[in-house]
Image (cartoon, helix red, strand yellow):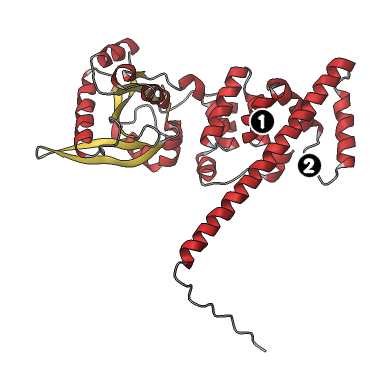
Amino acid sequence: MNEHPVRLMEPPEGYPSWLADLKSRIHTAQQRASLAVNRELVQLYWQLGQDILARQAAQGWGAKVIERLSQDLRAAFPEMKGFSSRNLKYMRAVAEAWPNEEFVQQAAAQLPWFHLCTLIDKLKTPEERDWYLRKAVENNWSRNILVMQIESRLLERSGTAATNFALSLPKPQSDLARESLKDPYRFDFLGLTEEAQEREIEDALVKHVTSFLLELGAGFAFVGRQVLLDVGGEEFFLDLLFYHLKLRCYVVIELKAGKFKPEHLGQLSFYLTAVDAQVKHPADGPTIGLLLCKSKNQVVAEYALRDKSQPLGVAEYQLVESLPPELLTSLPSIAQIERELAGSSLPEEEQQD
């Protein structure tokens, strides 16, 4: 006997919006449950690490006790993963790196366990680990993106562009704007040679806009390229236009394939005036300009910025980074990064082991 599919009735008025609300609440509950499980796991691992450290220090136990402990815990909890000798050593290392339990509960436990292991592996100083930990929490980085940011020396490059923000923007916006810019920017994902021209670079950046946004940092939203502005009947085109969600302002980026020249800022200042007059909303902050050039004299850039009233920054870009082959092979590919930004997660065994 053939079964006929049940014909669903037409949803009553208000049902679609109610269903959407229910889905949102269920998704939020799932996320909270997942975060709660992760917090408990990280705190458990940290406490185990503290115990190992304390007993090794007080009773002089050697490294072999970790192998014995691994065997005994695996036998006692065969359904649980994460009690390998390697992971127990990570527990000890994490407890040693972050001895403050309150910090672990409030900050470190917001990251998956393997993120913390990555910070231990890749970074040597507490200051570096804490900075990347905070950025990973703030920006919700996957492990692959965390590794890429560490390997690209994000900490050393952040907030180092030549700017006049301290004079042209009020606090705390000036500090946030300064921290939002880098120097240099790495565009080695474009596959271009050092001789590439401005339009080639622009084309490649738009083609790889996902990676470009990742390099720009959190908060940047792509608006368009070669954006047309009509000023007094004449046409002008912005290389790249972005909106910064945290600063609540437009950001105009201009590319120069050569060395920085002070007159470049005159053109960029004109673009900022036009965007402020024609594009920005009254509630938006002042438009920021970023000039990206192949090279610059830092002193010349600082002098050129000094008498400008609009918020402007100057930074270099690098198309090809001189990295050792073993480091290049350890970096995630463009495809991996794009998958990560699309929401893919770590393999289960990698998170638990």
Number of marks in picture: 2
Residues packed near mark 1 inside 10 Å, few (<14), some (14 to 19) or many (20 plus): some
The kind of residue on which mark 1 rests is Gln
Coordinates of residue 190 in the picture (x, y in percent): 42, 35
Horizontal side, residue 303 vs residue 193: left or right: left
Q: Which residue is mark 1?
A: 105
Q: Quadrant of the N terminus?
A: bottom right
In the displayed structure, does residue 305 sit left or right of residue 138? left
**Which sits in the foreground, 226 or 175?**
175
Toward which corner of the image does residue 148 lie, by quadrant? top right
Is residue 331 visible in the rendered structure shown here?
Answer: no
Which residue ends up furthest to the bottom in the rendered image? 1
Residue at point 50%, 62% (across, down): 18
Residue that numbered label 2 is attached to: 81
Rendered location of residue 62, percent (x, y)? 87, 19
Q: Horizontal placement of 264 versus 295: left or right?
A: left
> Of label 1 and label 2, which has the lower sequence position?
2
Residue 332 x %, y %: 56, 36
Front residue of 153 and 9: 9
C-alpha span from label 1 to label 2:
22 Å
The label nearer to you, 1 versus 2, is 1
